[in-house]
Amino acid sequence: MFSRDFSNIIRRYTPFPAIAILGPRQSGKTTFARMTFPKHAYVLLEDLDNRTLALTDPRRFLEMYENEHGIIIDEFQYAPDLLSYIQIEADNKNRPGYFILTGSQNFLMNRAIAQSLAGRVGILTLLPLSLHELQINNLTPDSLDEAIVTGGYPRLYAEPIDPRTSHLSYIQTYIERDARQLINVGDLGAFQQFLKLCAGRIGQQLNLSELAGVCGISVSTARRWISILEASYIIFLLQPHFTNFNKRLTKAPKLYFYDTGLVCALLGIALPSALALNTFRGSLFEAYIIADLYKQFCNLGDRPSLYYWRDLNGRLEIDCIVETALQLFPIEIKSGTTIASDFFNNLVTWSELAKQNAENGYLIYGGDLLQERSKGIVMGWKHAGQLVNKLLQVPGEE
């Protein structure tokens, strides 16, 4: 098992009768739950016999584990009605940390939890390995391009498997099983094309009309499919940050994937060497850093406070803004390995508008330096794995 930053916060949630660990398939949820709670019984609801019993006789299902130290119910979204019975158990018996629930369908899980276990469950999100987690496990890729193409799914670091082969298999399994179940997609080919179109628009503002037109579907279908991709932890939308110093701001979110390895597979980028001169390299590096910042928040048990900022005419944009209780931190992301003076232009202009010191901004780039400058802090990509800790002033390893 890999060391996960998640381990530092999980015990914070054990006073709850139930702990829900959500995240995409193969992000390590099951392994983490079983290693963290080794005395708990384990049951997988993808097993048809287990699922049938949980659906048809939920009381009997829970009684089977009455004398256990606790129970891990894996992929529990297959039996959402079971939560009502878990609620009764939680209310009638004082057993902190007894139920550990894992699942990979955010939309079904959150709705079911909100209805049945509000106030009785601690909810955590476990995403693929973050940059810092790769570093503490001595798994840091040799190059930036390798990091982007490989992504962070644990299996790729545990087994000698080709990343693109693994990613394409993951995508096919997702489409054939999860997508079909979630939205009853009749034309899976159209959905797969839609997913590829999304990959080709990574880091861009979401334009549902354009996506729908290219894919040959309605705007309402495109909106529904985006929601399903969000619910399955394939994509997330980075919302624009609204500030009071400029009213002419864009309102559209930007589209990102949680894992750049999946994007590379969808775009046909099979090797790090193929990425070096690819037109998507800059967008993929930006996506890699923003997804990693998102993971850092989740690994602290916090809701990601990440945004971007762009004026209406697109002349001024900040790639990412981290909002803390004290201030806003602007971050520019550049894939180049040599720092150019114009890399700081947007940071300086935004800081003037926001009436903040430019030196509080960050430039994350494809090189190795970590250096404070008058126009912002220069941070090579390998140093960015603990940036959220630093901005939130969380004690820990720098």
Image (cartoon, rainbow, N blue to C red):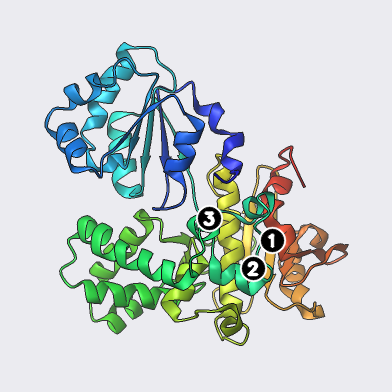
Q: Who's the residue at 17% across and 61% down the image?
A: 184
Tell me what residue is drawn at x 55 percent, y 39 percent: 301
Q: Mark 2 sits on what residue? A: 318
Q: Which of the pair 52/394 is nearer the observer?
A: 52
Mark-to-mark CA distance, 2 and 3: 36 Å
Could you tell whether 180 is left or right of 259 in the image?
left
Front: mark 2 or 3: 3
Q: Nearer the viewer, residue 219 or 234?
A: 234
Residue at 48% in and 56% down: 155
Q: Amino acid at mark 2?
A: Ile
Nearest the eye: 30 or 22: 30
Give percent across and percent down for residue 390.
Answer: 74, 47
**Residue 246 visible in this rendered orientation of the protein:** no
For residue 368, which quarter of the picture? bottom right
Q: Residues within 10 Å of mark 2 (few under 14, many from 20)?
A: many
Q: Secondary structure at mark 2?
A: strand
Classify mark 1: helix, strand or loop: strand
Q: Which residue is mark 1?
A: 330
